[in-house]
Image: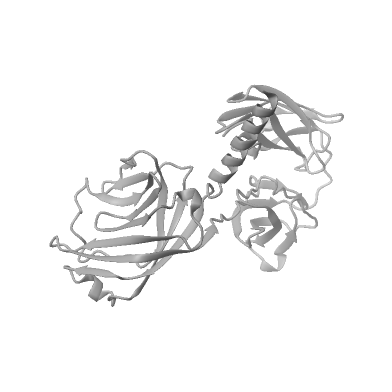
Amino acid sequence: MKKFLLSLCLTIFILSLVCTVNAAQMYYTFEGTITVINDGAGIIADAGLELGSKVSYTFLIDVDMAGTYTKNDGTVYPAPIEDNFYTDYISGSILQEKDGGYYNAPDDTAEINYGLWRFSNTYVYGGSRNSNIFLQMWGAPFDEWEVGSTGSVSNTAWDSAGNYSQLDAQDLILTEISPVTYPPTAIPGSDRVVFDSVTFDGSGSSDTDGTIIFFEWLLQHREDPNNNRTVEGINPTISDLEPGFYDVVLTVTDNDGLTGTDTMLLAAAGSCDCVASTMHIQSIIAGIAPASKNWKYGQVTVTIFDDCGIPVSGAEVTGTFTGDFDETLTITTNNNGVAVITTSTQAKKPSYTFCMIDVTHSSLTYDSNDDVETCKSK
């Protein structure tokens, strides 16, 4: 019996891997040649196409996401057929509507974003009611798609008089499958007031499908470009800043070479022999951290500064998660005054609020009146 159960579990595990080969969001490019033409609106001739002309269509497809369609009035509806998934026509040879098209009433469809399964076949829809694509992969369930899989496509477009043009490509071939990549998100932190030095914190930046490999901070002095500065790293320190306002641009680059930028304002007062006595919460960034499969941890990044505008290391930060998490945790800040607090429990689509309770330090007193923020929701 134990051997049977072990074998059954192993079989289910292997099947689950097979069935999710193409589960991630991917781009699919199909190519073919026109085999049938019905050009009642003259749109195909206007496009310079004829029998034998090459056509191509690239779709973004996500089988883990439900399909939708959007009316001309902007209302979004779920796909009207069961066993559907999300599609989005990206580029290619789609016929364009002529003279504004025919289906322009508020209740007509402005965008089609769904596909569906029927037995061993897969169907992909795209475009709009005025210019639509119907792509069919015969005998090819989505999880069996590979470069070289074959199918057919019909592309129809309308003119303002209600005439339509339609082309078919019955020799369609799937020529490329590539992952969808997303640029990273740069988070430079809140606006700052300092004396003549600053330590930046880019740890709140993130990349949903990869890793950030490069951080660049550009400080642009508003009055004198000669005072501009550039520094690299996730937590760099710059000293000897000239007084004035700086527009700070953080640019992050991920492992796919994509970039993300964001800005903050830095006000430098100049050198000062300040002796700190209190500390406060400078910023709270609420996010998530990946766990197993589709589960996520709640994660917040808390930054503590003293009353001289300097990050505080060695401060014990205590806060509470509520919502999908119910935990009170204490973490000590690092040399950059940052404490990253992560829940021990997980949720699939976390929704939570994190609120600070207390901050303690061996030589500084916590002054909550100086807090920039005390709670943050995700």
Residue nearest the observer in this picture, 239 or 350? 350
Residue 33 % position (x, y):
35, 71
Question: Height in image: 312 above or below 114?
Answer: above
Residue 358 % position (x, y):
73, 24
Residue furthest right as drawn: 362
What residue do we see at 80% from left, 57% from top?
240
Residue 375 % position (x, y):
61, 30
What residue do we see at 59% from left, 35% from top?
12
**Taking 44 as reference, is 27 left or right?**
right
Does residue 373 show up?
Answer: no
* Snapshot colouring: one colour
Does residue 158 show up?
Answer: yes
Dividing the picture into quadrants, the one containing residue 159 is bottom left
Residue nearest the observer in this picture, 359 or 89? 89
Residue nearest the observer in this picture, 376 or 292? 292
Dividing the picture into quadrants, the one containing residue 354 is top right
**Taking 173 as reference, is 100 left or right?**
left
Residue 117 % position (x, y):
39, 45
Dividing the picture into quadrants, the one containing residue 171 is bottom left
Residue furthest left as drawn: 161
In the picture, which quadrant includes the N terminus? top right
